[in-house]
């Protein structure tokens, strides 16, 4: 067979999760990594602030505190066994990255530097704790580079710019994937015993987003079309500080270093909403507070943005009011140079995209679509589980942002995604390799590319007058307005109707580029199809959940409702219709309590 | 404002030779050149091909020649060009595949040739290896590289001889040579002492000017040259 490849393990995606999985799987199994982007272009490289681990390098900290903070941050929807596993593994995982060569910033005594981040606290005092391990404000860049470098060192097989478009499932087990080689347009069959999806998020559904063009939810959409449900898709995080109108992220690390949010009256309004941790409350809490401020007319000049202020005089004023101290007990005082050294990329973004110098001027910010808590359901070993009883699908794995373990529940804490990548990427890799040693290749069907070909032929032969560009923009706009920070039944019904209309219109898109070589137009249309299907699943899951929890805030149901909704949503794609089911949350030590910051 | 875009086009499946297409589009001064390319692709010609992902200068996908200079299309704002005429072409020195997409493999082969990974076979401690703030600072600048190829493909020495490893590969080597935790500096210096190594650099500074991450590329190359000359890594 032409374009046929065989590997024990195929990893789809070369971001933090995919590379970590590949590093571990390739130790014992023949492993290939397929990525639509050249690996170092993956979105992990944009992560700024840090990776969470209770190293205690700056002040007292414990994995147990990290566990509790994550459970609380998740608004009690995270599975506590998995959260505990992640937070305890975190410490070794970060040391391992350091041993791989990751150039962490350092403390005066040569240890890994750490800074405070939203929702991470000293469980005794309730005050913010320095738990985010960082490399300036390019932690994700350094993780991505370091893991890629280690993969080169270990001769991992890479298939760069291969777009996976289908997963093969035979006899109820994973059998491989179908991919398009972008440079030639050829379809390839990758026959595998185990397949690991690590394709990242789908934030391109929303208009204002911190997410890359490539965040189109391919992995979840692919497996969903093959009968795997998606978990908790109604939970999507809106990060408080995106650059106004562009959505480009300004890391929470800015607030970790003492920056504050300011409204039109010059007030530090977070004091009202989170009296203890203020600007370092959980992201869902801060984003909602910002919306409320803007709704009450306190957006800057009445507009839909607020200021993020990290000028040294402001930082020092509020640090003094809060009584913030340095580790040696002296008062917390910063200079412009220090901020520049700790947050160089942020300063660069603000200068480039806003024309603002954040050391002397305030930055206009608004909440921006940021992170998918929901995704492909897995257990804590990265094995994909396909029903209410957590039945494992043999040979299928997922890790990173495309997966839902669930360690983030209804709201992810900052720094916990990078942690999720390295911990669950590693375990998915280990498990997949181990499984492949004892398993046989599934027999492939006579024409394994059939389903993928059908999808692409439909796009290539489409001959209408619709523009994908316009359809995409209409989706983003309605989803941002109606399935965003605040939601109502009426608004979401509107969005659902619109998304369904757009799915129909996408079938009548104008005839695309007929070529084979780097046909990015056809690929983009296929990706937009993925986004539209995930937008529909998101909206239907959100409509059904008649409560407010974490990132899912309903104005018509403003309270959390543990009696009825302390459960995970599962959504199946049944011939174009969404069917919902539910499964229980794993609760071990921490009974749900009201969430106060 | 109205801008006049002139874009290099080449589709190997239909064109014998490259040509240029012109488009007039309404642009905001704060638009990125990447926004304009997306607009043209979405509205006028879906066949226009280019790479992009992050759209804020971090992933390194969209290096191109914009009005004759190597830039990331997502980091170049219309207002900064100081003109309403925008010429967009692929970066030089790498084979064009289609429109603005070039074959990056020769570039990455050079990257791989300098052992771009930490080498240290001593068993690591239980916790982190210690490194002082000063030691960490020594190679900070070169950790910023995003492998976009803006530097290498702006270098006349690289255009003249593509066997030259080029500035980006030397930057990658620098990042490890000066990392106090690494043990293979001498090996990398030997590789770069080759006839296609550092001495092809004639300090023209194009690379430093082109770097979207503001890495002092020429300075880094100079430090590597000095280490080769003195046999000392300081
Ligand atoms: C601006 C920003 C800042 C952030 N800062 C932080 C932070 O400070 N701390 C933190 O913990 N988290 C942070 N996050 C979140 C975190 O960075 C991401 O959730 C995480 O990096 C995702 O990693 P991943 O490995 O799952 O996916 P990615 O790194 O995005 O990788 C996805 C991979 O899948 C490939 N792929 C996708 N579809 C296909 C397909 N169809 N076929 C083949 N390959 C495919 C892509 O090529 C890519 O290699 C941040 C996110 C953003 C956007
Ligand atoms: S698109 Fe990522 S650097 Fe421009």
Image: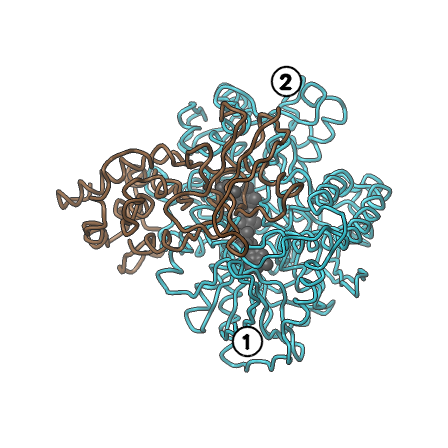
- Please give left or right for residue A556 compared with residue A343 in the image: right
Reading the chain from its start, which is encountered first: label 2 or label 1?
1
Figure quadrant of residue A93: bottom left
Q: Which residue is mark 2?
A: A266
Q: Chain of mark 2?
A: A
Could you tell me if residue B148 is visible in this image?
Answer: yes
Could you tell me if residue A65 is visible in this image?
Answer: no
Task: Please say if A188 is above or below A147.
Answer: below
Q: Which residue is mark 1?
A: A193
Task: Please say if A174 is above or below A65.
Answer: below
Figure quadrant of residue A24: bottom left
In terms of depth relative to the viewer, which is nearer, A295 or B63? B63
Q: Chain of mark 1?
A: A
Question: Label 1: few (<14), some or many (≥20) within 10 Å?
Answer: many
Query: What colour is chain B?
Result: brown
Disc on res. A11: none
Are tags 2 and 1 found on a single chain?
yes
| Mark 2: secondary structure | loop
Q: Position of residue A277 (x, y in %)?
A: 60, 33
- Please give left or right for residue B217 compared with residue A75 in the image: left
In terms of depth relative to the viewer, which is nearer, B122 or A291? A291
> Which chain's colour is cyan?
A
- Please give left or right for residue B179 compared with residue A206 in the image: left
What is the CA distance from the residue labelled 2 to the residue labelled 1? 59 Å
In terms of depth relative to the viewer, which is nearer, B126 or A314? A314
Q: Position of residue B84 (x, y in %)?
A: 54, 25
Dot in front, 2 or 1? 1
Q: Residue furthest front?
A: B16
In terms of depth relative to the viewer, which is nearer, A431 or A270? A431
């Amino acid at each position: 067979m032409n374009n046929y490849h065989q590997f024990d393990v195929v990893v789809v995606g070369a971001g933090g999760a995919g590379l970590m999985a590949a590093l571990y799987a390739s130790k014992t199994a023949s492993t290939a990594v397929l990525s639509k982007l050249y690996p170092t272009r993956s979105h992990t490289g944009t992560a700024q602030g840090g990776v969470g681990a209770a190293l205690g390098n700056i002040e007292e900290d414990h994995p147990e505190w990290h566990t509790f903070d994550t459970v609380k941050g998740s608004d009690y929807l995270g599975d506590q066994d998995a959260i505990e596993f992640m937070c305890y593994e975190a410490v070794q995982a970060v040391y391992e990255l350091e041993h791989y060569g990751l150039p962490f910033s350092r403390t005066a005594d040569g240890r890994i530097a750490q800074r405070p981040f939203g929702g991470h606290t000293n469980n005794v005092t309730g005050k913010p704790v320095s738990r985010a391990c960082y490399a300036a404000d390019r932690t994700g860049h350094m993780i991505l580079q370091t893991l890629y470098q280690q993969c080169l060192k270990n001769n991992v097989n890479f298939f760069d710019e291969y777009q996976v478009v289908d997963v093969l499932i035979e006899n109820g087990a994973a059998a491989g994937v179908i991919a398009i080689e972008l440079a030639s347009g050829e379809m390839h069959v990758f026959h595998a015993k185990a397949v690991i999806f690590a394709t990242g998020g789908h934030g391109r559904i929303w208009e204002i987003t911190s997410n890359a063009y490539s965040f189109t939810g391919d992995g979840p959409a692919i497996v969903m079309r093959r009968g795997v449900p998606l978990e908790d898709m109604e939970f999507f995080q809106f990060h408080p500080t995106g650059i106004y109108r562009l959505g480009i992220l300004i890391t929470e690390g800015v607030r970790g270093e003492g920056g504050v949010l300011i409204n039109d009256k010059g007030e530090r309004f977070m004091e009202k909403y989170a009296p203890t941790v203020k600007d370092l409350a959980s992201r869902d809490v801060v984003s909602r507070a910002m919306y409320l401020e803007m709704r009450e007319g306190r957006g800057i000049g009445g507009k839909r943005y607020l200021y993020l202020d990290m000028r040294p005089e402001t930082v020092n004023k509020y640090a003094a009011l809060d009584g913030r101290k340095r580790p040696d007990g002296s008062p917390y005082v910063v200079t412009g140079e220090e901020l520049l050294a700790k947050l160089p990329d942020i300063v660069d973004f603000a200068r480039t995209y806003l024309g603002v110098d954040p050391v002397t001027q305030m930055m206009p910010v608004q909440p921006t679509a940021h992170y998918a808590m929901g995704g492909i359901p897995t257990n804590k070993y990265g094995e994909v589980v396909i029903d209410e009883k957590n039945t494992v699908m043999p040979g299928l794995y997922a890790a990173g942002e495309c997966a839902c373990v669930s360690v983030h529940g209804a709201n992810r804490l900052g720094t916990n995604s990078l942690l999720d990548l390295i911990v669950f990427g590693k375990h998915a890799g280990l498990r997949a390799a181990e499984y492949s040693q004892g398993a046989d290749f599934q027999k492939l069907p006579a024409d394994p590319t059939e389903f993928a070909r059908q999808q692409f032929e439909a796009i290539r032969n489409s001959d209408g007058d619709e523009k994908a560009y316009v359809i995409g923009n209409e989706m983003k706009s309605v989803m941002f307005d109606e399935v965003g920070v605040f939601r109502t039944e009426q608004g979401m019904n509107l969005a659902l109707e619109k998304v369904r209309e757009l799915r129909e219109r996408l079938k009548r898109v104008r005839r695309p580029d007929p070529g084979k070589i780097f046909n990015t137009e056809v690929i983009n249309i296929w990706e937009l199809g993925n986004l539209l299907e995930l937008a529909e699943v998101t909206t239907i899951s959100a409509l059904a959940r008649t409560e407010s929890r974490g990132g899912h805030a309903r104005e018509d149901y403003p309270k959390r409702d543990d009696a009825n909704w302390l459960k995970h949503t599962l959504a199946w794609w049944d011939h174009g219709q969404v069917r919902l089911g539910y499964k229980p949350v794993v609760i071990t030590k921490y009974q749900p309590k009201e969430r106060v910051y | 404002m109205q801008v006049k875009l002139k874009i290099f086009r080449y589709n190997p499946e239909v064109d014998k030779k490259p040509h240029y297409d012109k488009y007039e589009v309404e642009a905001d001064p704060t638009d990125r050149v990447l926004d304009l390319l997306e607009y043209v692709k979405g509205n006028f010609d879906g066949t226009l091909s280019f790479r992009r992902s992050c759209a804020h200068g971090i992933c390194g996908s969209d290096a191109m020649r914009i009005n004759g200079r190597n830039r990331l299309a997502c980091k170049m704002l219309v207002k900064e060009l100081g003109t309403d005429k925008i010429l967009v072409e692929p970066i030089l020195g790498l084979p064009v595949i289609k429109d603005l997409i070039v074959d990056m493999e020769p570039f990455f082969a050079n990257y791989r040739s300098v052992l771009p990974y930490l080498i240290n076979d001593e068993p690591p401690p239980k916790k982190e290896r210690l490194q002082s703030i000063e030691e960490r600072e020594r190679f900070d600048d070169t950790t910023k590289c995003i492998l976009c190829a803006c530097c290498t493909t702006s270098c006349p020495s690289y255009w003249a001889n593509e066997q030259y490893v080029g500035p980006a590969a030397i930057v990658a080597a620098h990042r490890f040579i000066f990392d106090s935790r690494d043990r293979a500096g001498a090996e990398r210096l030997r590789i770069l002492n080759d006839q296609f190594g550092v001495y092809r650099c004639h300090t023209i500074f194009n690379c430093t000017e082109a770097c979207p991450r503001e890495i002092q590329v020429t300075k880094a190359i100079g430090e590597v040259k000095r280490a080769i000359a003195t046999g000392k890594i300081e």
